[in-house]
Image (cartoon, rainbow, N blue to C red):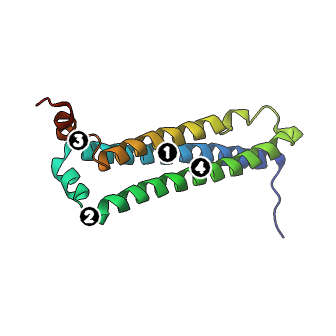
Amino acid sequence: MTERLNDTERLKILIAALERYQANYNTSSYSTMGFWLLGLGWLLTSDSARTFIGNEGNMLREAAIVFIWLNWLLFTYASYRVYKVSDNLYKQLENWEFAKGSFEHAKMPLAAISLYSVFIALVVVLITVVLCGNLDVSNVAAKTGSHT
């Protein structure tokens, strides 16, 4: 015989699930952003890394660019999926009269998910620019005729 939870217990579990979706998503997003910012910082400060990755005929640069853009696409897709699961649970709670007024604080906003994806895309664009050699100081100095 299965024991059935009362409404209060079910509501607590569902609100906790909504809150965990949001907290885990935020943690994952901050970790992903930190990882990409760390990579960008490493590329900006390491001449040897840029030289190694940027060597002509070296497929590493192209592979890195494909990898980071694919990673961003997968992150964006996964973010949207997490949002949809959370939103479906939220909508079910909205239709439950007993839950009214007790779960609204745990809604995962689509705007936040979109902003995370946009911010990570900006970092990915900067990494791509660095990998393509467009932020190399020696290239800029040679093109403008100035010397540093």
Q: How crowded is mark 2: few (under 14 residues within 10 Å), some or many (20 or more)?
A: few
Q: Name the residue under label 1.
A: 29
Q: Nearer the viewer, residue 1 or 79?
A: 79
Q: Is mark 3 on a helix, strand or loop?
A: loop
Q: Position of residue 135 (x, y in %)?
A: 27, 40
Which mark sits nearer the N-terminus, 2 or 1? 1
Can residue 20 be seen here? The reply is yes
Q: Mark 3 points at which residue?
A: 136
What is the CA distance from the residue labelled 2 to the residue labelled 3?
18 Å
Circle nearer the N terminus (1, 3): 1
Q: Are marks 4 and 1 in contact (CB under 8 Å)?
A: yes
Categorize mark 4 by other alpha carbons within 10 Å: few (<14), some (14-19), many (20+). Answer: some
Q: Nearer the viewer, residue 1 or 127?
A: 127
Of labels 2 and 1, the one closer to you: 2
Left or right, 104 with respect to 121, comes to: right
Marks 1 and 3 sit apart, C-alpha to C-alpha, by 29 Å
Q: Residue type at mark 4?
A: Ser
Mark 2 vs mark 1, CA separation in Å: 31 Å
- Whichever of callouts 4 and 3 sits on the residue coming sooner in the sequence is 4
The location of residue 86, given as percent across then percent down, is: 69, 47
The one of 52 and 107 positioned closer to us in this rendering? 52
Q: Residues within 10 Å of mark 1 (few under 14, many from 20)?
A: some
Mark nearer the viewer, 1 or 3: 3
- The disc labelled 2 sits on which kind of residue? Asn
How far apart are the two marked residues, 4 and 3, measured between alpha carbons? 33 Å
